[in-house]
Amino acid sequence: MSNRLQAGDDAGFEMGATAAPVIRIDDLTGSEIAALLQEHNNEMRSISPPESCHALDLDGLRVPEVTFWTMWSETVLVACGAIKDLGGGHAEIKSMRTSRVYKQRGLASDLLSHLMAEATVREFRRVSLETGRQDFFEPARKLYIKHGFEFCGPFGSYQDDPNSVFMTRKLGQHAR
């Protein structure tokens, strides 16, 4: 994680955190993650029509091909994200979310860096994602571009959708 999140940094958290946030694999059983994912799904449904809302619920994330991580500041859940194995060396970023209280602090960037490092270790050759086309999703699109993602067409089981944007990034020796 970046140095700006080290203990004592002015970027600190309102709740008195003294240590840098910790990212760990999560089993999706805690009430905190259920609440954050409910917040995420409710917001996605309020912005996108049902046929364009691709956020997974808890059961959709509790499948063998998904690994889910949470980011904690001491005992406070601040962000989450997942990698879904699509097969053939292709993975998808799912459920990237920063709690409303902790947005605009660089946490999503740190979490995405962690997910991309994990994807590299797992020898994925490509990582893709779907996000919204609406203005609300512009910060997310900027984050993904900053991390080397490029716009692409639908992948996996996705279809063309006027409300969706698809992005991808090649990894490892395939990145050039």
Image (spheres, grey):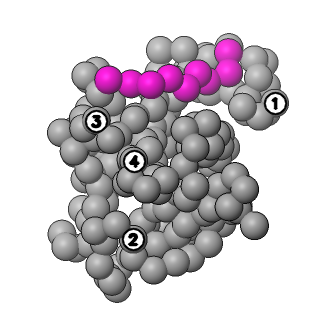
Q: Is residue 59 magenta?
A: no
Q: CA distance from mark 2 to mark 4?
A: 13 Å
Three-letter amino acid code at the position of disc 1: Asn
Which is nearer the N-term, disc 4 or disc 3?
A: 3
Q: Marks 3 and 1: CB-CB under 8 Å?
A: no
**Mark 1 / mark 4, whichever is N-terminal:** 1
Q: Residue 102's spot in the image, x, y percent?
A: 54, 38
Please determine whether, in this image, residue 93 is positioned above or below residue 161.
Answer: above
Residue 155 marker? 2
Label 1: which secondary element: helix
Q: Which residues, given as a range, are shown in magenta?
A: 19-27
The residue where tag 1 is placed is: 3
6 and 126: which is toward the camera = 126
Please give the label number shown on residue 85: 4
Give SS at disc 2: loop
Look at the numbered discs 4 and 3 and tell me whether their residues touch, using CB distance below 8 Å: no
Q: Amino acid at mark 2?
A: Phe
What whole-number distance in Å separates the C-alpha atoms at marks 4 and 3?
9 Å
Residue 64: image tag:
3
